């Protein structure tokens, strides 16, 4: 049936849009061409939606009117809801409804073509509904009566989505302004449910109406599979959806580990405390303490205070308690944090903040019951510093800050703290069968996301599927349950898996070709292999002067702009050059500890070893001292110094200084 291909397929239109140098702007657009047509037009579009379980059922009525004075043939492209499938068609004309039959596509086209020939029957409207690349359906109406209207009704099913604590579905809006806007009515999922319906224009070429409601009880990570016989084994279809993966902990105990070193400075300390306040807004019933670390660590409040007292408690602190100093001993802060968490009860949250400029001797804290508990987490938040430059973070910061604890790292530029309150994603996700073989891998599964996967195993039946991953850096897993309703619905899913740009899908996301043909043959849904045909009783070839669509192919116009990533060179900071007199200037500053501790005596074997980042002393060690008292004196006097503001590229630099004779 040649005239069914009068519009170019979607992939061909995309090629036209992407091909360089094509001058097609002067051609009429699809909507302009449609507006000038005299074959009739759509005058009403109604859709009734009924959410049930994880599906939404649509009953759609669309009315088309022929304003002309002779019978005509009309063609319309019907956009479908995302991953929606058509399960029925009916045609109404002059008050009489005719139910459509689901036939092999070639058979439906032959019968429709036969009705378009000349004959002796009275003209009766006929409807053919065929699939168009899965994302839409093509409707053909033959013998649309003059100055009269006909209505088609079709049934659609689609999956309900989940995101941010709400369930939702979408319904497509027309691309052309002259087409009627659909009147969408939604039956509440449960009595009294508050529904929200609004227009979404995230994709300008595909505006939709979105209906959403509060999700209620979430399934968490919902992983289920459907199985059907396949040779000597089974054909599996896996459906995974991450709903609300976790809940906000109740009455949590929170400890903020704040970097108060010179490299962070007063502004950096203030920023850390502001972040802590923002974090507590997400945990209004929590109690909190601040552990400040420099060379050593200290508690700021001395107790776990209610989140409601946070601002008052901070305002009452003397300024000296938050003054920056030498040393960035994060490990000391973590050890003190574990002591704080030994008080009271409740889920533990630790947020350690630092610019990463630590002494080389830094080691993660040993495990403790409070920080290794299943409901505990130790997170690292990076603090940006204009003086950090190209410095490489301490290698031990790439792993857990406390051994055997869970937690993640938050970049300095991130604006969301919710991911530090509760897990929002799984990472390093993989599907595993009963023999331990990995069947599917993906880097991460974010809350609200999901994926589909076909698992053809013609020789061995599939069994004992499990989904594994890491949540806040710790191992997590969930069994994949075999769902009888999904097993009985493989045919519909075989089609939806092919929907929405199949050329972008991985091979394992698409069912085997033979499986598609077999399942489509036994299914009740519109597909590439099966079409709906509605023929009223008594309809046949007639002699009516029908204004038929021309055979052949009519070219279309597609326009668009393809986006891409533009790589802009980043301005790198030039490494700081240390002037030749740097060592001499440092030795001059450090003679003060020697004079104070050695007096007039000499100790030629004494050496002072310093790790420094610009004006901050990070670590101090003394060797060759005559006594421990002498070593302690030199060490403490050095820690008390404030180095000059030497040029600083953010790296830790080693210096060895001896007393002058």
Image (spheres, rainbow, N blue to C red):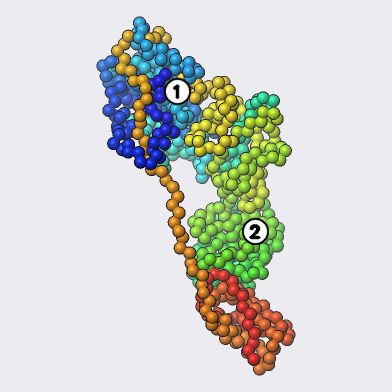
Is any atom of residue 285 visible in this view? no
* 606 is higher (above) or lower (below) than 217: below
**In the image, what residue occupies the spot 65% across and 39% down?**
439
Instruction: Identify which residue, 633 or 269, lies in the foreground.
Output: 633
Which residue lies under the disc numbered 1?
Answer: 130
Considering every residue shown, the one lying at the far left of the view is 69
Position of residue 150 measured from the top left corner of the image (x, y, whole percent)? 35, 19
| Residue 251 percent location from the top left of the image | 60, 55
Secondary structure under the numbered disc 2 in the rendered image: loop
Q: Earlier in the sequence, mark 2 or mark 1?
A: 1
Which of the two marks, 2 or 1, is nearer to us in this view? 1
The reply, left or right, for residue 500 in relation to residue 335 is left
Decide: is 506 above or below 602: above
Which sits in the foreground, 143 or 242?
143
Q: Residue furthest top?
A: 120
Residue that appears at 52% across and 32% down: 498
State the mark number for residue 400: 2
Circle 1: element type:
strand
The mark found on residue 158 in the picture is none
- Is residue 266 among the parts visible in the rendering? yes
Q: Residue furthest bottom?
A: 600
Which is nearer the eye, 396 or 420? 396
Q: Residues within 10 Å of mark 2 (few under 14, many from 20)?
A: many
Q: Nearer the viewer, residue 502 or 65?
A: 502
Residue 178 drawn above or below residue 443: above
Q: Quadrant of residue 450?
A: top right
- The structure residue drawn at horizontal position 36% and vertical position 17%, both measured from the top left corner, is 142
């Amino acid at each position: 049936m040649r005239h069914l291909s009068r519009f170019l397929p979607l992939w061909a239109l995309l090629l036209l849009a992407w091909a360089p140098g094509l001058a097609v702007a002067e051609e009429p657009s699809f909507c302009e061409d449609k507006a000038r047509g005299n074959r009739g037009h759509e005058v009403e579009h109604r859709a009734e939606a009924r959410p049930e379980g994880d599906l939404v059922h649509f009953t759609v009525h669309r009315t088309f009117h022929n304003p002309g004075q002779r019978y005509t043939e009309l063609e319309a492209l019907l956009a479908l809801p995302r991953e929606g499938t058509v399960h029925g068609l009916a045609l109404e004309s002059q008050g009489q409804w005719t139910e459509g039959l689901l036939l092999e596509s070639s058979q439906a086209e032959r019968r429709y073509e036969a009705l378009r020939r000349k004959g002796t029957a009275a003209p009766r409207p006929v409807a053919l509904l065929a699939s168009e690349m899965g994302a839409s359906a093509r409707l053909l109406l033959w013998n649309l009566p003059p100055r009269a209207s006909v209505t088609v009704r079709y049934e659609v099913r689609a999956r309900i989505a989940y995101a941010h604590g709400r369930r939702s579905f979408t319904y497509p809006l027309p691309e052309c302004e002259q087409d009627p806007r659909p009147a969408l009515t939604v039956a509440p999922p449960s009595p009294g449910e508050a529904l929200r319906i609004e227009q979404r224009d995230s994709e300008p070429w595909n505006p939709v109406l979105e209906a959403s409601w509060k999700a209620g009880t979430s399934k968490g990570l919902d992983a289920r599979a459907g199985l059907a016989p396949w040779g000597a084994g089974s054909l599996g279809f896996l459906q995974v959806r991450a709903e609300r993966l976790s809940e906000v902990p109740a009455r949590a105990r929170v400890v903020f580990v704040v970097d108060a070193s010179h490299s962070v400075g007063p502004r950096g300390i203030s920023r850390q405390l502001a972040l802590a306040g923002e974090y507590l807004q997400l945990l209004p019933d929590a109690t909190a303490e601040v552990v400040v670390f420099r060379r050593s660590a200290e508690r700021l409040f001395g107790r776990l205070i209610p989140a409601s007292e946070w601002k008052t408690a901070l305002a009452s602190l003397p300024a000296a308690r938050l003054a920056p100093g030498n040393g960035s001993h994060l490990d000391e802060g973590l050890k003190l944090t574990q002591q704080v968490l030994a008080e009271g009860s409740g889920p533990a949250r630790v947020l350690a903040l630092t610019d990463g400029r630590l002494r080389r001797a830094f080691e993660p804290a040993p495990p403790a019951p409070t920080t290794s508990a299943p409901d505990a987490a130790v997170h690292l938040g990076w603090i940006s510093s204009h003086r950090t430059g190209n410095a490489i973070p301490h290698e031990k910061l790439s792993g857990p800050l406390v051994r055997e604890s869970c937690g993640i790292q938050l970049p300095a530029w991130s604006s969301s703290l919710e991911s530090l309150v509760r897990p929002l994603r799984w990472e390093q996700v993989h599907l595993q069968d009963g023999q331990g073989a990995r069947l599917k891998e993906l880097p991460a599964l974010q809350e609200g996301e999901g994926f589909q996967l076909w698992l053809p195993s013609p020789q061995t039946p599939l069994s004992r599927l499990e989904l594994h991953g890491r949540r806040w850096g710790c191992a997590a897993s969930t069994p994949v349950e075999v769902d009888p309703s999904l097993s009985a619905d493989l045919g519909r899913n075989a089609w939806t898996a092919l929907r929405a740009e199949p050329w972008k899908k991985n091979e394992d996301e698409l069912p085997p070709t033979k499986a598609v043909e077999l399942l489509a043959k036994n299914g009740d849904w519109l597909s590439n292999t099966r079409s709906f045909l509605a023929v009223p009783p008594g309809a046949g070839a007639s002699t009516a002067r029908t204004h038929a669509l021309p055979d052949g192919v009519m070219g279309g116009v597609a326009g668009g702009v393809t986006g891409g990533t533009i790589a802009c060179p980043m301005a790198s900071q030039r490494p700081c050059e240390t002037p030749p007199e740097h060592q001499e200037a440092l030795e001059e500053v450090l003679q003060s500890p020697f004079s104070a501790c050695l007096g007039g005596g000499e100790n030629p074997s004494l050496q002072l070893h310093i790790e420094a980042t610009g004006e901050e002393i990070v670590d101090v060690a003394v060797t060759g001292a005559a006594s421990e008292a002498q070593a302690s004196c030199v060490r403490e006097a050095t820690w008390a110094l404030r180095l000059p503001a030497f040029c600083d590229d953010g790296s830790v630099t080693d210096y060895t200084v001896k007393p002058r004779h």
